[in-house]
């Protein structure tokens, strides 16, 4: 399912435009599984599933699988509707060089939320 | 669409606030009981456009919404460039009292959201006899810092984009897209460091946990309305204040941290019964208190 994020993000022209200056690789951790997601000019060009030996990324978003499952519901319940909601509840850890994440916060929030469309199908 | 003016009148008020001359932008509509509306941190009084335009509200209330100094169309005081903006409890309380005095308001109702929801608790504690009633939206005694606010004001991150990004999830996912993005636009227009300066009050200086129990809601009725999707001021935080003060708490379904702006129509459906009750209290005053 996570691999679908590339197709969903890249098909959303408005989202790609919002992230047109984003050029980074970040780590998404869903429970025990890590994914390195590489973005060039707002498009996801690679999704690589772990395990990794020496993963190279700018920032990491780590949460238990159950928390992501709640977040990815088509209409998430209160407390699970946003990355910062998960973060404030202590379910999401945000680590590393946060500059690309914070400078493009609306973009990254929607990139992660893109998988809700997968659920809605 | 045929062109039409809204009934809102916006004017600039010159007055001394906190001992300094200020030019303050004030909007108002309606007549009756004064209802002063306080916007959230880093935003402005446009958040109350729905309330100001609702005839069911303005039939009995004179709704007044001002942009705080540094916000919206109000200017910062002269010399602003020399200092870092930081809102304190003391200044915020004084500002509201001085504005109410400048407008010669007779026992107004004050309704504030977020930082405004916090300051009404301070008003309830310090000045219960000056107000007819207080309405706290997204009101809690304290919100602990949960992210590094220095991201909100630094030259290598666009302030408007990051402020909107930080608050976007506080809006209920069911809010209409137009009102959601209008709400975020206000955040995108804030001056550099202003949202961060307001959060100094919200997360540090405005902590009122040690005084909440001393609030006497018999001297000034207190109503607390909080959206279920608010993870900043949580429903638990609001219910705790209600339990400790005897205030009435209403949890609003399908709303988040900016109820009056993210979905004005739904919010007003929660607000009208509260305004009716405050008005009923007023009628009792009129009958029994000829003075």
Image (cartoon, coloured by chain):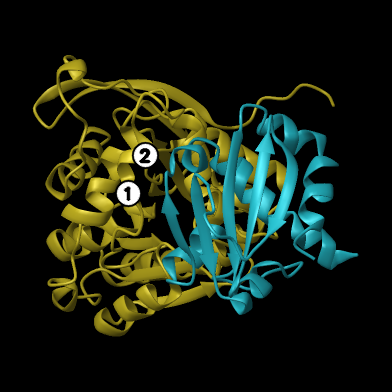
Answer with left or right where residue B79 lies relative to residue A43. left
Point 55% across, 37% down: residue: A104
The residue under label 2 is B151
Quadrant of the rendering where the C terminus of chain B is positioned: bottom left
Element under label 1? loop
x and y percentages locating residue B126 in the rendered image: 13, 60
x and y percentages locating residue B42 in the rendered image: 39, 38
Q: Are marks 1 and 2 in contact (CB under 8 Å)?
A: yes
Point 77% across, 21% down: residue: B3
Point 13% across, 71% down: residue: B211
Colour of chain B, in one word, is: yellow
Residue B65 versus residue B280 in the image, above or below = above
Discs 1 and 2 lie in a common subunit: yes
Q: How many marks?
A: 2
Which label is found at residue B148? 1
| Residue situated furthest right in the rendering | A121
In the image shown, does A111 or B37 lie closer to the viewer? A111
């Amino acid at each position: 399912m996570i691999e679908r994020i590339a197709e969903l993000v890249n098909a959303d022209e408005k989202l790609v435009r919002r992230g047109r200056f984003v050029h980074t690789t970040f780590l998404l951790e869903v429970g025990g599984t890590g994914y390195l997601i590489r973005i060039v000019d707002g498009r996801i060009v690679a999704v690589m599933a772990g395990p990794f030996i020496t993963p190279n990324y700018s920032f990491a978003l780590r949460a238990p699988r159950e928390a992501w499952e709640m977040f990815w519901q088509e209409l998430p319940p209160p407390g699970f509707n946003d990355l910062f909601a998960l973060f404030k509840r202590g379910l999401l850890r945000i680590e590393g060089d946060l500059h690309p994440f914070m400078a493009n916060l609306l973009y990254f929030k929607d990139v992660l939320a893109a998988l809700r469309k997968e659920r809605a199908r | 669409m045929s062109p039409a003016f809204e009934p809102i009148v916006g004017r600039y008020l010159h007055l001394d606030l906190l001992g300094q001359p200020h030019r303050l932008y004030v909007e108002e509509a309606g007549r009756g009981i004064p209802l002063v509306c306080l916007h959230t941190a880093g935003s402005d009084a446009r958040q109350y456009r729905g309330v100001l335009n609702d005839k069911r509200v303005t039939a009995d209330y004179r709704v007044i919404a001002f942009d705080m100094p540094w916000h919206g169309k109000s200017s910062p005081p002269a010399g602003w460039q020399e200092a870092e903006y930081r809102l304190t409890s003391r200044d915020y309380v004084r500002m509201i009292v001085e504005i109410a005095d400048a407008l010669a308001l007779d026992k107004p109702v004050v309704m504030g959201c977020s930082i405004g929801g916090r300051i009404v608790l301070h008003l309830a504690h310090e000045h219960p006899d000056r107000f007819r009633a207080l309405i706290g939206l997204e009101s809690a005694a304290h919100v602990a810092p949960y992210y590094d606010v220095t991201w909100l004001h630094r030259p290598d991150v666009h302030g408007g984009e990051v402020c909107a990004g930080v608050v976007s999830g506080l809006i209920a996912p069911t809010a209409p897209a137009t009102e959601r993005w209008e709400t975020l636009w206000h955040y995108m227009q804030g001056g550099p460091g202003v949202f961060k300066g307001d959060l100094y009050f919200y997360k540090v200086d405005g902590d009122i946990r040690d005084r909440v129990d001393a609030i006497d809601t018999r001297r000034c009725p207190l109503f607390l309305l909080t959206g279920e999707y608010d993870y900043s001021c949580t429903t638990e935080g609001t219910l705790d204040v209600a339990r400790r003060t005897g205030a009435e708490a209403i949890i609003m379904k399908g709303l988040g941290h900016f109820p009056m702006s993210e979905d004005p129509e739904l919010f007003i459906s929660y607000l009208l019964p509260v305004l009716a009750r405050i008005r009923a209290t007023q009628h009792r005053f009129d009958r029994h208190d000829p003075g």
